[in-house]
Image (cartoon, rainbow, N blue to C red):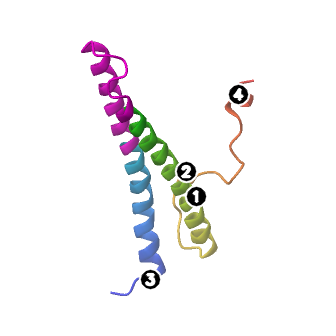
Amino acid sequence: MTMTRQIASARLARQVPEAEQAIDQALQATTAVLQTMLSARIEADVPPHTGQLALSKLMQSQQALIAASNDFMRVHRELAAIGQELMAADYGDCPPAKGALENPAKQAA
C-alpha cells in the first residue's frame, strides 16, 4: 500500500503524542526508582554514601530523558509546520514556537 500524505499525517498525529507520553512515563518511572532508592537508604539505616554511584547514574539518565523530551518537542514543532505547509495535518497541542515561553516568574508578577 502506498503511503499518501493523509495516511502519513494520520499516523504521525497518533504516534507523536504517544512518543511524548512515553518519554514522560519513562521520567515518571525513573523518578519512582529514585524515590525508592532514597527511601531504602534512609529507612534501612544504611550509610549515606550507599548507592551514591547508582543515584548519580540515575540522575544522568533523567537528564538524558529531559534532553530527549526537549528534542522531541522540536520534532513535534517541525512536523506541525510541515503539516501546515502541506495543509495535511493538525497535530493538536503543539509546543510553542521557540522563545514563546515566558519566564514563569514574570507571569506571576
Q: Are marks 1 and 2 in contact (CB under 8 Å)?
A: yes
Mark 1 and mark 3 lie on one chain; the one further toward the N terminus is: 3
Tell me which numbered mark, 2 or 3, is placed earlier along the sequence.
3
Label 1 and label 4: CA atoms lie apart by: 24 Å
* Cβ atoms under marks 2 and 4 closer than 8 Å: no
Which mark is drawn over residue 70? 2
Marks 2/4: CA distance?
Answer: 21 Å
Q: CA distance from mark 3 to mark 4?
A: 45 Å
Q: Position of residue 44 (x, y in %)?
A: 24, 15
Q: Which residue is mark 1?
A: 74
Q: Are marks 1 and 3 in contact (CB under 8 Å)?
A: no
Height in image: 28 above or below 21? above
Determine the residue positioned at 34% across, 23% down: 38
Q: Secondary structure at mark 4?
A: helix
Q: Main secondary structure of the magenta part?
A: helix
Give the residue type at disc 1.
Arg
Instruction: Assign a secondary structure to mark 3.
Output: loop
Q: Which residue is mark 3?
A: 4
Q: Residue furthest left?
A: 44
Point out residue 71 in the picture as x, y percentages from the top left corner.
54, 56
Amino acid tagged 4: Ala
